[in-house]
Amino acid sequence: MRAAAYPGTFDPVTNGHIDIIRRASKQFDEVIVGVLHNSQKTPLFSTEERVNILKEVTKDISNVRVCSFEGLSVDFVRTCGAQVFIRGLRAITDFEYELQMAQTNRIMAPDIDTMFLITSLEYAYLSSTTVREVAMLGGDVSKFVPSFVAEEMRKKYGF
Ligand code: ADP
């Protein structure tokens, strides 16, 4: 069985993330989406909320599992029984950081590889940070995230 782990913050999950999850699910028997719990940061959505949101918006993809993790992503990949990391690449600006992370992870865990999926053109501009900013200012985010997420954001910001 070939399993891939897709770690990230997903605060919130966007259509760009979902595109990556959907495409990865066609290449692997199982995709495990890992929601990072970082006690040093205060995200918009708690870890539990992000896990529940991801479960809801990926419920139609049968080979996707969602869980949370803390600490090193290489440990998360191993615990899941996966052999590879999935990461999404948007612009050149992602590349430098992702290259550094992939090489660091490779030294820590030579048996685990990182595979990059290039963003689909229609999501190339999309980031969770921008979506949060638009929502915070009362903008409509329904073109950037699933309607369930847009609704959860409206509730969070009290619109
Ligand atoms: P992190 O904080 O680990 O970067 P994110 O949740 O922001 O977590 O992103 C997780 C992964 O998804 C990263 O590899 C990121 O580059 C990728 N990603 C984010 N937005 C998009 C997008 N619009 N298209 C493709 N990949 C994306």
Image (cartoon, rainbow, N blue to C red):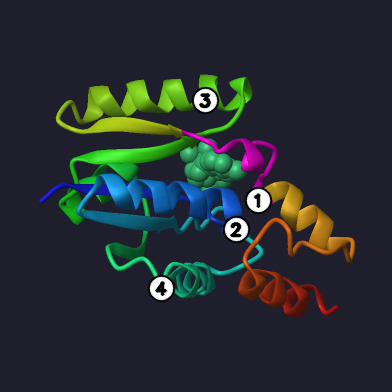
Closer to the chain start, of discs 3 and 1, is 3
Q: Which residues are magenta?
A: 118-128
What type is the residue that disc 2 sits on? Asp
Q: Is residue 99 above or below residue 148?
A: above
Coordinates of residue 37 in the picture (x, y in percent): 45, 59
First in residue order: circle 4 vs circle 2: 2
Element type where label 1 sits in the image: helix
Residue for badge 2? 11
Q: Earlier in the sequence, mark 2 or mark 3?
A: 2
For marks 3 and 1, give the CA distance: 17 Å
Q: In the visual, does 151 lie left or right of 98? A: right
Q: Position of residue 11 (x, y in %)?
A: 60, 58
Q: Determine which residue is flagged by label 3.
A: 97
Question: What amino acid is found at the position of numbered circle 4 in the picture?
Answer: Lys
Q: Is mark 3 within 8 Å of ligand 1?
A: yes
- Identify the disc placed on residue 128: 1
Q: Which labelled disc corresponds to residue 141?
A: none
Ligand 1 within 8 Å of disc 2? The answer is yes
Specify which label sits upstream in the sequence, 4 or 1: 4
Q: Are marks 2 and 1 in contact (CB under 8 Å)?
A: yes
Q: Can you identify the residue that label 4 sits on? A: 59
SS for tag 4? loop
Q: Please state which amino acid type lies under the numbered disc 3.
A: Tyr
In depth, the one of 119 and 35 nearer the eye is 119
Q: Give the mark nearest the N terminus, 3 or 4.
A: 4
